Amino acid sequence: MSRDYRERALAYHAEPRPGKIAIEVTKPCNSQDDLALAYTPGVAEPVREIARDPHTAFRYTAKGNLVAVITDGTAVLGLGNVGPLAGKPVMEGKGVLFKRFANIDVFDIEVDAPAADDFIDTVARIAPTFGGINLEDIAAPRCFEIERTLIERLNIPVFHDDQHGTAIIIAAGLLNALEIQGKSLPEADIVCVGAGAAGIASMDLLLALGADRKRILLVDRQGVIHSGREDLNPYKQAYAVETDRRSLADAMQGADVFIGVSGPDILSPEMLASMAARPIVFALSNPDPEIRPEVALEVRDDMIMATGRSDYPNQVNNVLGFPFIFRGTLDVHAREINQQMKIAAVAALCALTREPVHPDVLKAYNLDRLEFGPDYIIPKPLDPRLIDFVPPAIARAAVDSGAAREPYPSHYPEPPKIGVT
């Protein structure tokens, strides 16, 4: 990063007022009567209603449009364990995206809790304030325990975006890429490098969509996760297979799909050359991918490639998911974000990619044309139709699966009948 860019970034966050988010008042507060309604004595009436029926909090307070973005600061972006306070700019940034793309309000909350149990207790105790919990930048494997326990304890959605948001976008892009390459998910040999939150959640979702567990090789810093290893936590152990392959180079031989959620420059040109015909490469490490597209294209001209960067085609970006997933979830007062809802989000993103590209997208990205194909396997983050595709799919799945407390919203269009294969 250049010194000039660093200074611009710091100035952006500091001026003209510190931070990126604020609270606004949504009701008139200009007269004595306004004050009496906003606070005492008028505020007593919704208090009585909520005490009588807690669900009315969704009607009389901001709860139904308020998400907590919560971190312990143990895995902040690519910066590692910088602590909760240093993670605050990222949590505020997440709030900006929630508001910008789905008009959802956010309180960012940074919790100083080195022990997972303390973090869980803190979040559980403040949960009544919110309509949903977005966990963020929490290191594996503690993130798995934290999310699972909070889902069990709370009656509002708990969603670790680094796990499931990433998994949803990867799955949507991969299903489209497989179709373009003339391949199918059940028959694809998949190598995933990175056995943390994003890697394991992505493999879990691909299994739910029809991938063959025997065809998945998960790779961590020690190499292929195989049944002979004794250093595996329970989440990695679920992907331990009987194989004589040990290194990433071994794993890549004949692979159809590479998914990297690890670090820069770990996929060599030789490894890429050893993949099967018409390979798919998702090099998602940011800012530097596992292999740069310009390097990869010198080796393979038959591949489809995605990265996490906006300056290359096929950006895998979580902003395609979490704002719209929570919009649909909140609008039916869902208790959870379940597997059916995640699969519905995948299907909606797959379907939107196949629609004619919106003129606003072409303008925003300075393009003359764009269509479903090798360089367009996933919607662009600035596509204005995401709000029309993903929330209705989420809401319908929530209603159909019994996760919703409210019926399908009358102001929503009926989602198209879309499936994933």
Image: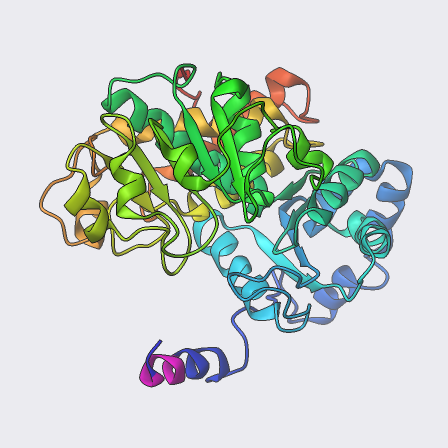
- Out of 70 and 400, give the one closest to the viewer: 70
Residue 404 lies, with reference to residue 137, above or below; the image says: above
Name the image quarter holding the N terminus. bottom left
Q: Which residues are magenta?
A: 3-8
267 inside magenta stretch: no
Prevailing secondary structure of the magenta residues: helix
Horizontal and vertical percent position of residue 296: 23, 46
Residue 393 lies, with reference to residue 379, above or below; the image says: above
- Out of 94 and 384, give the one closest to the viewer: 94
Residue drawn at point x = 46 percent, y = 84 percent: 15
For this view, does 114 lie left or right of residue 108?
right
Residue drawn at point x = 66 percent, y = 64 percent: 73
For this view, does 328 lie left or right of residue 382?
right
Name the image quarter holding the C terminus. top left
Horizontal and vertical percent position of residue 417: 40, 14
- Out of 341 and 256, give the one closest to the viewer: 256
Q: Can the viewer see residue 378?
A: no
Residue 204 lies, with reference to residue 98, above or below; the image says: above
Count of marks, rendered view? 0
Q: In the current view of this chain or complex, which residue is farthest to the front?
A: 244
Q: Can the viewer see residue 49?
A: yes
Residue drawn at point x = 38 percent, y = 61 percent: 287
Colour treatment of the image? rainbow
7 inside magenta stretch: yes
Q: Looking at the rendering, which quadrant does residue 329 occupy?
A: top right
